[in-house]
Image (spheres, rainbow, N blue to C red):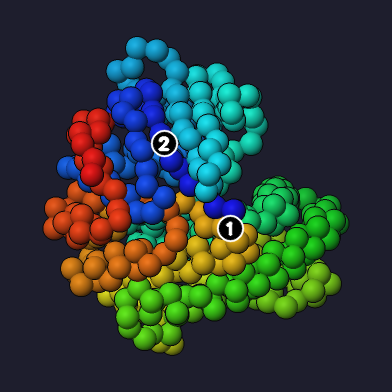
Amino acid sequence: MNCWKIKKLQAQNFRNLKNSVFDFSPGINCILGQNGNGKTNLLEAVYLLTNKKSFRKNTDYSQMINIEGEKPELILQSVFQNEDELLPYSLRMTDTSEERFLNNKPEKKKTPSSSVFINPFDAYHFHNSSTFRRQWVDSHISLSDKEYRQVLTRFQKAIKFRNSVLAFGGKNTSTQLRAIDDQISDYSAFITQKRFEFLTALNTFITPTFKAIFSEEHALELTLDSQFVHWDKKRIFDFYRHQENIDIKAEITQVGIHRDDFIFSFDGLNAFEFCSLGQQKMAFLSLIFAYIELFRYKFTSYPIVLIDDVSGELDSQRWKNLVQYLETKNFQVLITTANENFGEELEKIPESKKFYIEHGTLKHHG
Ligand SMILES: Nc1ncnc2c1ncn2[C@@H]1O[C@H](COP(=O)(O)OP(=O)(O)OP(=O)(O)O)[C@@H](O)[C@H]1O
Ligand SMILES: [Mg+2]
């Protein structure tokens, strides 16, 4: 199996991380340390290398460069490993440039593996915000489908233009809308079909994943709530003709795939309304690990899994279950916690490596 894992990482001038060399295990890596010492920063450095951007919103070089650093450049040096093959990969960023090097030669592409980031806030956002759910689905389809990403970008431009035409008004509005809707209905049919196929594939993994992690039988499903499921381009175009006067009056596009939602059901009930916070987190974790299984199914390789202190709301038994589940998997995990009780559970994993971080420095490992 083609499965690149991160073997070594050294960060220079990246946030509070101080030049320590992290020598990772291909299995489970536990990142331990008290609040504010650099655990999440370490995950962010791996994510930046592997996915070409930060997982923090609106974050660029100026936030990531060490505020006390003497040199105005940040460097991440790493080695990736796939069985016996080693691949040095580095990133150098300054205020005006970003360079990547593979085997010490300039390289445009990202690392040979991607990573998935799991954090405690996304579970809340996922359950509470339809915009977040839409972005979650769109970004996860896009990770593995370039055409989807391109069509979605074209759609977003077109809908922005449509709304500006509606806001501006004027006697040509109807003619202009027809021209735009010709494109929009094409993109909408494509995107809806892709979203539907993605959820159908994902759903085959969510219920078994929940059972595998938490040893409980619950039926989980993420479904698409859209007017356009299985509609073709013509039907969507005709729908927009019926909708035209309503949109002109409202001066905005009222219905469309930009407003579609996703419903997460738990034993047939809406998880957003019915589940406790702990169950919502369990459901969300199962959704992400189901995505990771789907990823492997499609690409025959796992992404690197970065898990940032998800222990809140999970009781000690559920946390134990999650840890045991990770032990059974072949993917590389970097998991952090500041909670000492939960940290003890991680320390018990026989094959795992432990890293203790203090003030951005690797204090000791085991
Ligand atoms: N650009 C920067 N330069 C220097 N330090 C920074 C920079 N950005 C953030 N920091 C510092 O990095 C520290 C560690 O942040 P990080 O989020 O990694 O902590 P953590 O170990 O994950 O803590 P917690 O357990 O609370 O989540 C913070 O104290 C923050 O002030
Ligand atoms: Mg943190």
Q: Which mark is residue 8?
A: 2
Residue most extreme to the front: 84
Q: Nearer the viewer, residue 74 or 326?
A: 326
Residue pictured at 63% horizontal, 24% vertical: 105
Task: Give residue 15's quadrant in the image.
Answer: top left
Q: Which mark is residue 309?
A: none
- Callout 2 secondary element: strand
Q: Measure how far apart labels 2 and 1 are at the Cα level.
A: 21 Å
| Residue 301 location (% of width, % of height) | 56, 58
Residue 274 in sight in this render: yes
Label 2 CB, ligand 1: below 8 Å?
A: no
Q: Is residue 339 left or right of residue 176?
A: left
Residue 52 in sight in this render: no
Task: Give residue 18's quadrant in the image.
Answer: top left
Q: Give the number of marks.
A: 2
The residue that mark 1 highlights is 1
- Callout 1 secondary element: loop
Residue pictured at 50% horizontal, 23% vertical: 93
**In the image, residue 39 above or below residue 190:** above
| Residue 194 location (% of width, % of height) | 68, 67
N-term mark: 2 or 1: 1
Q: Are marks 2 and 1 in contact (CB under 8 Å)?
A: no
Circle 1: residue type: Met
Residue pictured at 46% horizontal, 33% vertical: 78
**In the image, residue 102 above or below residue 309:** above
Q: Nearer the viewer, residue 305 or 102?
A: 102
Circle 2: residue type: Lys
| Residue 225 location (% of width, % of height) | 57, 75
Image quadrant containing the C terminus: top left
Image quadrant containing the N terminus: bottom right
